[in-house]
Image: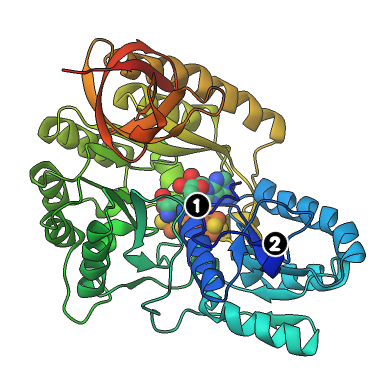
Amino acid sequence: MNNKINSTQTVDKTKKQKTYLISTWGCQMNEHDSEKMAGMLDGMGYACTDDIQHTDLIIYNTCLVRENAELKVYGNLGELKALKRDRPDLIIAVSGCMMQKKEIRDIIKEKYSFVDIMFGTHNLHKLPQFIANHNQTSKMIIDVWEEGGEIIEGLPVQRKYGFKAFVNIMYGCNNFCSYCIVPYTRGRERSRNPKDIVNEVIKLSKEGYKEITLLGQNVNSYGKTLENKISFAQLLRMIDKIEGIERIRFMTSHPKDLSEELILSMKECTSVCEHLHLPFQAGSNRILEIMNRKYTKEKYLEHVNKLKKEIPNISITTDIIVGFPGETEEDFEDTLDVVRKVGFHSAFTFLYSVREGTPAEKMENQVSDDVKRKRFQMLLDVLHPINYEANKKYEGKVVEVLVEDTSKNNKKVLSGRTRTNKLVHFEGNKDLIGTLVNVEIIKAKTWTLEGKINEK
Ligand code: SAH
Ligand code: SF4
Ligand code: F3S
């Protein structure tokens, strides 16, 4: 969870400027939605705060992808009850993917009746209106759209960083992987007009942004819903031409839509980073089919080989689900086999979580929690030495790092990322935040690299 969004507005207590706090769960799509809400609130004269005890507005921007994300939101909401009792003027809003589900809205209406506003993923642009209506009526406002309408352009955005930015290129998902709730919370796939995307990136470049991350649930199928169809590879080439943007990243790629054209544009576009997040979820062809992923283990490995051939220093990262219904020991072995063969630089690993309303919920042969946990540990035992090996190859090399922050534990230590998305720690002045520096890697760890600034 992350609740820090920088605000241009500073808190002036003499003027009693109103403040807001946004807590965000879930993916980058949600993080960016929170940046848009922050932009609208700044426009209304609110300032950002992390002081939950005294803020005027709390927004929980929620995620529904796994049960634990959902439970955390209920836990946090429970803690707000006393705050609201002591300060009835405090406005509490809940937004995001959980709100797209009627059953959850009903639970909140009943058990957390102190919540003032509920809205969903498709109508967050109405936030100023919701607040105004609530202020006038003091009534609970519930406004959720079942489907996304036309894409709303031009919303103000208050970005968390001044040097790297998220840019939506598409919304929704049409893939309906059988375990996944996202197509139900984010609606059908729709692509933004390439002109709007390019104009946004040009504007960001003029404002000094160096890195952009193009966002979509399945960026490889970008452009299919446009009148004048263009591919994601073509979009990358258009953005690559924009001066001032040093790094282009994108999330997430679906293996079924990964084209040779895309691999080639990644190779040829100088700003596109040598990193690909390519979730494979499971190694067994039988499980992949029941997951409705529409590729095989062999096809996935073929993609990886092509990527490594064309972009030799590429880092490939992934998502893996353990314990999908019906997964046998043999199926799980296939997952381990893919992990061993690819040599992932890192992976997000998940225990399969039953999501109400998805086809996998109805599957009878659910794997027991004990077996899931045992396999999960086995997966980590295989994965971590491989991640370490991938990092070890950086020792002695000089890499370009975009400095992002000071280290959480030691303010004299800076942290940043390589083009291959490796987290690097090194000593340096915090004025370097937002700049590109060369760092010599001294020591590799499983998840991070340690280095020193290379003055040459
Ligand atoms: N659109 C992206 C990511 C969507 S959600 C993609 O297709 O890659 C991020 C990750 O959460 C997925 O890649 C998957 O690994 C995981 N996930 C989704 N539903 C899940 C579930 N029910 N249980 C466990 N993990 C899940
Ligand atoms: Fe979910 Fe699959 Fe769509 Fe990703 S591609 S959001 S995993 S349905
Ligand atoms: Fe979660 Fe919604 Fe993202 S369910 S992962 S916040 S699209």
Q: Residue furthest front?
A: 14
Q: Is mark 1 within 8 Å of ligand 3?
A: yes
Graded by Cα atoms within 10 Å as few (under 14), some (14 to 19) or many (20 or more), the crowding at tag 1 reads few
Q: Is residue 43 above or below residue 420?
A: below
Which amino acid, by three-letter code, is at mark 1? Cys
Q: Is residue 245 left or right of residue 40?
A: left
Q: Is residue 418 above or below residue 169?
A: above
Residue 271 image position (x, y, % from top left): 16, 45
Q: Is any part of residue 60 visible from this angle?
A: no
According to the picture, the residue beneath numbered tag 1 turns out to be 27
Q: Quadrant of residue 285?
A: top left
Dot placed on the residue nearer the N-terminal end, 1 or 2: 2
Q: Is residue 208 left or right of residue 409?
A: left
For image coordinates 46% across by 19% down, the residue present is 384
Residue 279 image position (x, y, % from top left): 39, 43
The C terminus, quarter of image: top left
Q: Is residue 397 left or right of residue 267?
A: right
Q: Is any part of residue 140 visible from this angle?
A: yes
Residue 282 image position (x, y, % from top left): 44, 38
How many numbered marks does the figure carry? 2
Q: Quadrant of residue 394?
A: top left
According to the picture, the residue beneath numbered tag 2 turns out to be 13
Say what secondary structure mark 2 lies in: helix
**Distance from label 1 to label 2 (Cα)?**
34 Å
Q: Is residue 222 above or below residue 254?
A: below
Which amino acid, by three-letter code, is at mark 2? Lys
